């Protein structure tokens, strides 16, 4: 084994240069050609910058709410609740979310409230909602913003992200872009 | 069919379509035949050998292979330990993350060294960019290369001849990294940067949200990391939420790419074995056994996740999938598919939080890791399967009254003893660990220095995040994941403390190196034996019947060893939710 020590150390150093200096260097150079130059995709509105892929906390009645988050949308400490499906504490939390939602949305039909609006995501930073999750909030937003419901429905339609290539994966709505569109609609 | 189902079917078929030609390519690389990457990487490898004083043409016996493998792994372990213990003053630490504690560094260094990537820290706050790239990503490359090199030694030993010379370890190792892992990583990482994964050396960004809150956003050199994380079946996330994080896995497309990347080489190694030893039919038998096992686990998991949580259904809201811990851009179907794929293969990356899955899914994840060779990790998955194969040959031979032979070599007592030890080591490590931690939990032992919860209390039950059966499953999962070198977790468990760091670290070391040493030793011993050409008296191994026999051996060992533990955890939880 002793005679393997020096070759091992030298080969490791060579590999370190190739896999940890040259390889990330190439990818960094490629990233300079990508949108956002490898610093994340952003959207700018009213001179302010937001990360498009990273969900934000929306609890204000005039905005579409985002999903609950176990880490309160802390993008410097992602994570889920890690509560088991039969955990009484977890089930109580879900029930509370249902009640809170119904209190703020008295016009909504409870039987149509989708699960994603009352369960926390895996990262705590989920940027998306199901289409049903956006639809059920339309009445509340129309009321708070004095807008026409059909107008808001059209906005959801415009901001729906369809499955990849039309056939792969779920349909969803990006909450941030939807809310930005909503603000834009009100103050064009 | 709905778009979520089509998504996973396309994902699976695309992997198979890519794996067959990749397997042929891998076989050519290990056989030393001319391949198209010679022009680019040939000169680089020559330079590396010159610098290191290695003669790649010098053939080694199986003991020399193991000596080289263990020595170089020791070097890597010390390097990683140094990085993690000193990261606060080393460069590339824009977020000023502190040094890891010694017990955490021990666990982290081992778990990346052994291709497990059990992470008891969160990437955002627990490591610097220096550690991420120079220690952890480095280990993700070389530990995958180690597993593949060990498999290459076994391939070589099973050729139809008598020999002690089984190629050169450094040659197999370096070529696995340069010819197979690196080129594919370049493609995967490039796709990621164009889909929104970051590749920057800048630290946390602060911004004000639309609603007016202040928000901190962690970033980093993620794209290069996430590519090898999956291709090498490592699974360690750059961020705490792993591939559920919207920077680490931003779109359905990246989700597909990551999924394909992690199954690709485990598939391809089986086909490479077929091409290398000219036993293509046997390779397909092996692949089919693995696939049937995978489907038996994945289909119930998808059904139970899509059906959702009956206890939430009772609240009178719209009936839907189980979405706690899941991301909307992947959906329940792709998340369930991922959860089983990542556990049958030893990746252990997650795109949804396993702790919050339904009991049946949790059980199937556990079973995937307990059997640990329905595909399995890069290289080592094949080695684990090889152990079962030897057992099946022996049992089959005895059943029909023929001398047990495999690939023209007799299987005798010595090989059988090694195979049995390796097959039983896995349940022993899992069950002993779970028994120990369950004892402390049940007695609510004062753990002293070994454990303290967030409130500073030392009671053992404080490490559980869930009560009752699910709490037991959390502990069972942690040791199963460690022993399978998987790295996923029921992450609710408070595992960053000396008790869990040290005990799982020990399990990791044993469960990595013994299952490499065992199969290499068996193959090495077999290679020295006289080659007996196949005759009418030989038990045929490339048939469906033999495939069924291997499957039965696996099921019997797993059922006997693990059924009681599963009954106490996920099965009891499932019954309680009825």
Image (cartoon, rainbow, N blue to C red):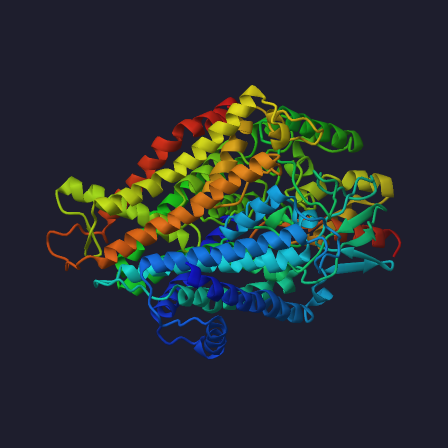
Q: Of all residues shown, which one is farthest toward the front? A: A2
Residue B116, position in %: x, y?
51, 48
Q: Is residue B162 above or below residue A116?
A: below
Residue B268, position in %: x, y?
40, 60
Q: Which residue occupies 33% across, 64% down?
A: B60
Asked whether residue A164 is in view, the answer is: no
Dividing the picture into quarters, in which one does residue B119 lie? top right
Residue B301, position in %: x, y?
48, 39
Using the image as rendered, state which of residue B449 and residue B231 is in the foreground: B449
Using the image as rendered, state which of residue B310 and residue B387 is in the foreground: B387
Residue A180, position in %: x, y?
80, 53
Q: Of all residues shown, which one is farthest toward the left? A: B536
Taking the image as shown, residue A16 lies to the left or right of residue A63, namely: left
Taking the image as shown, residue A81 lies to the left or right of residue B402, namely: right
Q: In this view, does B167 lie above or below B549?
A: below
Using the image as rendered, state which of residue A149 and residue A120 is in the foreground: A120
Taking the image as shown, residue B578 lies to the left or right of residue A150, namely: left
Asked whether residue A120 is in view, the answer is: yes
Q: Which residue occupies 36% across, 72% down?
A: B57
The mark tally for this picture is: 0
Using the image as rendered, state which of residue A25 and residue B554 is in the foreground: A25
């Amino acid at each position: 084994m002793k005679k393997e020590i020096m070759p091992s150390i030298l080969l490791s150093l060579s590999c370190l240069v190739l896999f940890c200096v040259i390889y990330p260097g190439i990818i960094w150079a490629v990233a300079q050609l990508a949108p956002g130059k490898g610093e994340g995709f952003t959207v700018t509105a009213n001179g302010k910058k937001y990360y498009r892929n990273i969900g934000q906390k929306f609890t204000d009645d005039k905005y579409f709410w985002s999903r609950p988050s176990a880490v309160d949308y802390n993008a410097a400490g992602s994570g889920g609740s890690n509560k088991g499906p039969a955990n009484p504490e977890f089930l109580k939390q879900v029930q509370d979310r249902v009640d809170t939602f119904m209190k703020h949305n008295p016009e909504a039909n409870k039987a149509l409230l989708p699960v994603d609006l009352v369960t926390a995501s895996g990262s705590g930073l989920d940027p998306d909602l199901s289409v049903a999750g956006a639809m059920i909030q339309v009445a509340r937003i129309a009321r708070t913003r004095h807008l026409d419901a059909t107008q808001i429905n059209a906005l959801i339609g415009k901001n729906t992200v369809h499955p990849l290539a039309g056939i792969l994966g779920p349909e969803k709505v990006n909450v941030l872009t939807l809310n930005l569109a909503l603000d834009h609609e009100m103050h064009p | 069919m709905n778009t979520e189902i089509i998504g996973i079917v396309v994902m699976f078929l695309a992997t198979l379509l890519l794996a067959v030609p990749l397997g042929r390519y891998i076989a050519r690389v290990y056989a030393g035949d001319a391949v198209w990457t010679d022009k680019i990487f040939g000169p680089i490898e020559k330079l590396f050998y010159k610098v290191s004083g290695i003669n790649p043409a010098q053939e080694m016996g199986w003991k020399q292979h193991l000596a080289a493998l263990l020595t170089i792994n020791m070097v890597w372990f010390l390097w990683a330990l140094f990085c993690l213990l000193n990261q606060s003053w080393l460069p590339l630490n824009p977020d000023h993350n502190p040094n890891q504690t010694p017990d955490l560094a021990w666990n982290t260094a081992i778990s990346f060294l052994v291709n497990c990537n059990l992470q008891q820290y969160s990437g955002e706050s627990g490591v610097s960019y220096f550690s991420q790239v120079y220690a952890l990503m480095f280990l993700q490359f070389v530990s995958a290369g180690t597993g593949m090199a060990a498999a290459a030694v076994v391939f070589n030993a099973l050729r139809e001849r008598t020999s002690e010379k089984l190629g050169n370890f450094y040659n197999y190792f370096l070529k696995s990294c340069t010819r197979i892992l690196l080129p594919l990583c370049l493609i995967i990482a490039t796709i990621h940067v164009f889909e929104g994964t970051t590749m920057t050396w800048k630290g946390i960004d602060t911004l004000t949200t639309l609603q007016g809150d202040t928000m901190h956003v962690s970033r980093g050199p993620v794209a290069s990391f996430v590519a090898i994380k999956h291709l090498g079946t490592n699974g360690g996330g750059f961020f705490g939420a792993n591939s559920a994080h919207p920077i680490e896995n931003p779109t359905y497309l990246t989700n597909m790419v990551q999924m394909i990347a992690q199954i690709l080489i485990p598939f391809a190694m089986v086909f490479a074995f077929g091409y290398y030893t000219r036993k293509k039919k046997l390779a397909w038998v092996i692949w089919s056994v693995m696939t049937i096992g995978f489907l038996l686990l994945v289909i119930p998991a998808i059904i139970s996740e899509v059906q959702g949580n009956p206890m939430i259904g009772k609240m009178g809201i719209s009936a839907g999938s189980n979405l706690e811990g899941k991301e909307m851009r992947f959906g329940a179907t792709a998340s369930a598919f991922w959860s089983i794929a990542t556990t049958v293969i030893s990746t252990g990356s997650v795109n949804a939080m396993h702790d919050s899955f339904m009991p049946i899914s949790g059980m199937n994840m556990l079973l995937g890791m307990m059997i640990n060779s329905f595909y399995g990790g890069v290289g080592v998955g094949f080695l684990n399967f090889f152990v079962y194969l030897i057992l099946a040959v022996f049992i089959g031979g005895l059943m029909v009254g023929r001398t047990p032979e495999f690939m023209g070599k007799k299987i005798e007592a010595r090989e059988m003893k090694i195979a049995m030890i390796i097959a039983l080591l896995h349940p022993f490590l899992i069950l002993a660990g779970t028994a120990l931690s369950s004892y402390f939990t049940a007695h609510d032992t004062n753990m002293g220095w070994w454990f303290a919860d967030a409130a500073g209390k030392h009671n053992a039950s404080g490490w559980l995040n869930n009560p009752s059966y699910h709490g037991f499953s959390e502990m069972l999962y942690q040791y199963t994941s460690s022993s399978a070198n998987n790295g996923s977790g029921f992450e609710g468990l408070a595992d960053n403390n000396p008790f869990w760091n040290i005990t799982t670290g020990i399990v990791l070391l044993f469960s990595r190196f013994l299952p490499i040493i065992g199969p290499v030793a068996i193959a090495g011993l077999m290679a020295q034996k006289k080659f007996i050409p196949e005759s009418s008296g030989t038990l045929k191994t490339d048939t469906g019947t033999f495939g069924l026999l291997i499957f039965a051996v696996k099921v019997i060992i797993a059922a006997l060893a693990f059924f009681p533990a599963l009954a106490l955890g996920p099965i009891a939880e499932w019954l309680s939710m009825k």
